[in-house]
Amino acid sequence: MNNWAVISTWNMSYEGLKTSADLLKKGTDAKDAVEKLINQVESNAEYTSVGYGGLPNENGIVQMDAAFMDGNTLAQGSVAAIENVKHAVSVARKLSSNKTNSFLVGEGASNYAMKNGFEMTNMLTANAKKTWQQKVKETHEHDVHPYAGHDTVGAITLDQNGAVTVATSTSGLFMKKNGRIGDSPLSGSGFYADSDIGAAAATGLGEDIMKGCLSYEIVRQMSAGRSPQEACDSAVYSFCKKLKQRYGQVGEISLIALNNKGEWGVATNVEFTFCVADNKHKAQIFTANPAP
Ligand code: SD4
């Protein structure tokens, strides 16, 4: 049996990761295993940064970004600022089979989902609405920074045939501008996969992650012979340093990576939880901290 492995961002992905690990163990392919993982997080109303229950934009509307990339064919699909769709990542997966029109945004993305039979629902839960109303009130009363609280689920799977797939899904930054898009649906920034090498996925402040195309950079460094951990350390920490020097500040940035041997790595500039399982180890949640 070839090695299989799965890694995902934040402890909210733990249950989904376990489902995915069970599938990979049985020989399910990397694409199905990653979609199931992300779908499970998207369905859980308790997670306020992904899918159903996600916190809305400044207009009180939940707009989601998601992506799916097959590392065998390099096919990718993305949706951005999509509304009223239960599983944004599944729409992204469907789009990845298109030769053209593989990245849709806003109304076009929602209409495509509806026409193709995806489950449509109002994604704003009563709890998320309450949090939004409170924030709107605070924002008027004090000068508060509106963007607190945001976590993308990003996941990478390696199946028993050596295929690598990556996917992401997020409701993005709470109180973001209507139509704002983060890194999560952007190839090379929020995600990248190549089964000859491995894959990477990002979470954090999209505007800063985009400045470094960090997912692609990590895959590129792995292809040059670095281990996933070396590639994550080198790409993330040198970029954070550069951004601080050149731009003056750097937002939260965390990256996960997995190579096609099943070795993984993580680098972050905040306290960051992530989950891993493989054919030798049971599903586990780890906490990573910024390098000293
Ligand atoms: C974004 N990167 O929309 C996402 C949000 C996120 O941890 O991952 N936060 O910018």
Image (tube, grey):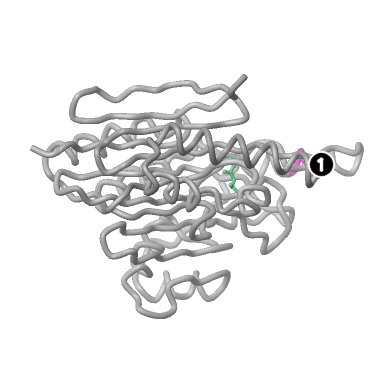
Residue 123 percent coordinates (x, y) = 53, 53
The image quadrant of residue 228 is: top left
The question of residue 136 being in magenta is answered with yes
Nearer-the-camera pick, 287 or 292: 292
Q: Is residue 251 above or below residue 207?
A: above
Q: Secondary structure at mark 1?
A: loop
Quadrant including the N terminus: top left
Please state the total of marks drawn on the protein image: 1
Residue furthest bottom in the image: 100
Point 64% across, 56% down: residue: 61
Going by the numbered disc 1, the residue's amino acid type is: Gly
Q: Specify few, some or many for label 1: CA neighbours under 10 Å numbering under 14, 14-19, or 20 or more.
A: few
The image shows residue 46 at horizontal and vertical percentages of 50, 35
Please tell me which residue is depicted at 60% across the width and 41% down the height of the picture: 204
Prevailing secondary structure of the magenta residues: helix
Locate residue 49: give its quadrant. top right
Q: Nearer the viewer, residue 257 or 120?
A: 257
At horizontal 51% and vertical 51% (from top left) the residue drawn is 190
180 versus 140 height, above or below: below
Q: Residue shown at 35%/62% (left/top)? A: 93
Q: Badge 1 is on which residue? A: 248
Task: Looking at this view, name the residue that lies furthest to the front.
Answer: 224
User: Is 234 inside the magenta-drawn segment?
Assistant: no
Nearer-the-camera pick, 84 or 291: 291
Residue 137: image x %, image y %?
Answer: 83, 41
Q: Is mark 1 within 8 Å of ligand 1?
A: no
Quarter of the image where the C terminus is located: top right
Residue span colored magenta: 133-137
Query: Residue 281 at x, y = what percent?
Result: 24, 22
